[in-house]
Each structure stands twice: as structure tokens, then as C-alpha cells.
């Protein structure tokens, strides 16, 4: 019986080696695809004209204010976007990590995303903080 257990362990380890080699080959193929250039023109999703705020505009938050409902909607949209594009997002906004979403793609690349949802009329404010 003891030799069966040892033999089973060896078979499991060998199966794991085959599995890891297959995963490695798949990842290498995906990496090769990432290096390929597409002859298609880029798709423009949007554009922004960004100018620095004056101290008065900054002090008044450019007409924007915190709104928990809007912030929750912004988080939902960001999480859905990541999932829809093959990433695995995780909401870490309650952990005080300096960002709201940690997202990992199938190759193990990580993104750290800060989400801001603000209520108000007018433009968008981007700050260095």
C-alpha cells in the first residue's frame, strides 16, 4: 500500500509538470501575440483637453463634490470594464492601499486603479494628489 501512495504522488507530480509546461507554452503564445502590430488604425474612445486649475478653481473643487452614490457607480463601471476586458479586478477601496482596484490579467500583469466619481456640473478636474 505504501508503494501505491508513493507511485500516486509521483504520477500527480508528473501530471503537474505536464500541466505547467502546457500553461507556459500558452503564455508564450499569448506574449507573441502581444508583440504583433495591427495594421488597423487605432480606435479613438475619447479625448480630453487638460489645463491646470487656478488656486480658486482648485479650492472650490471646480464645482464638484463628493457623492457616495456617484462614487459607487464609478466603481461598478471600472470593475465591469476590467472584467469585460479579461482582467480580474478586486475592490480594495476599503483597505487604504492608496488605490481602489487591483486588477490582474491572465499573464499576471497588475494594474492599480484609483477611481473618482464626482457630482457636479461642468468639466473634469485632475489633480496630482
Image (spheres, grey):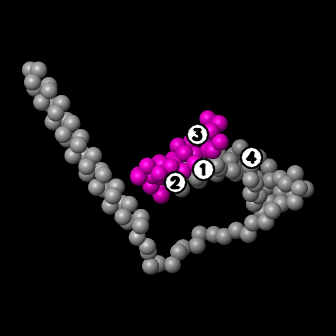
Q: Earlier in the sequence, mark 4 or mark 3?
A: 4
* Percent position of residue 52, x then y: 81, 62
Q: Residues within 10 Å of mark 3 (few under 14, many from 20)?
A: some
Q: Secondary structure at mark 2?
A: helix
Q: Earlier in the sequence, mark 3 or mark 2?
A: 2
The answer to whether mark 1 and mark 2 are in CB contact below 8 A is yes
- What is the number of the mark on residue 67? 4
Residue at image mark 2: 82
Label 1, label 2: how many angstroms apart (C-alpha)? 10 Å
- Is 85 located above or below residue 73 in the figure? below
Residue 76 visible = no
* Percent position of residue 77, x then y: 59, 53
Residue at image mark 1: 113
Residue range highlighted in magenta: 84-112
Q: Earlier in the sequence, mark 4 or mark 2?
A: 4
Label 4, label 3: how many angstroms apart (C-alpha)? 19 Å
* Residue drawn where x is 30% and y is 52% of the image: 24
* Percent position of residue 78, x then y: 58, 53
Quarter of the picture containing the N terminus is: top left
- What is the number of the mark on residue 92? 3
Q: Is residue 103 magenta?
A: yes
Amino acid at each position: 500500500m505504501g508503494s501505491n501512495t508513493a507511485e500516486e504522488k509521483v504520477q500527480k507530480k508528473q501530471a503537474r509538470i505536464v500541466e505547467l509546461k502546457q500553461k507556459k507554452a500558452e503564455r508564450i503564445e499569448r506574449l507573441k501575440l502581444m508583440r504583433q502590430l495591427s495594421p488597423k488604425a487605432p480606435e479613438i474612445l475619447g479625448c480630453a483637453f487638460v489645463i491646470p486649475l487656478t488656486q480658486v478653481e482648485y479650492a472650490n473643487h471646480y464645482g464638484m463634490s463628493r457623492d457616495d452614490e456617484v462614487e459607487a457607480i464609478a466603481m461598478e463601471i471600472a470593475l465591469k470594464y476590467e472584467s469585460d476586458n479579461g482582467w480580474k479586478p478586486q475592490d480594495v477601496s476599503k483597505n487604504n492601499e492608496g488605490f481602489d482596484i487591483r486588477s490582474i490579467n491572465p499573464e499576471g500583469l497588475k494594474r492599480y486603479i484609483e477611481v473618482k466619481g464626482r457630482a457636479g456640473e461642468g468639466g473634469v478636474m485632475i489633480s496630482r494628489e
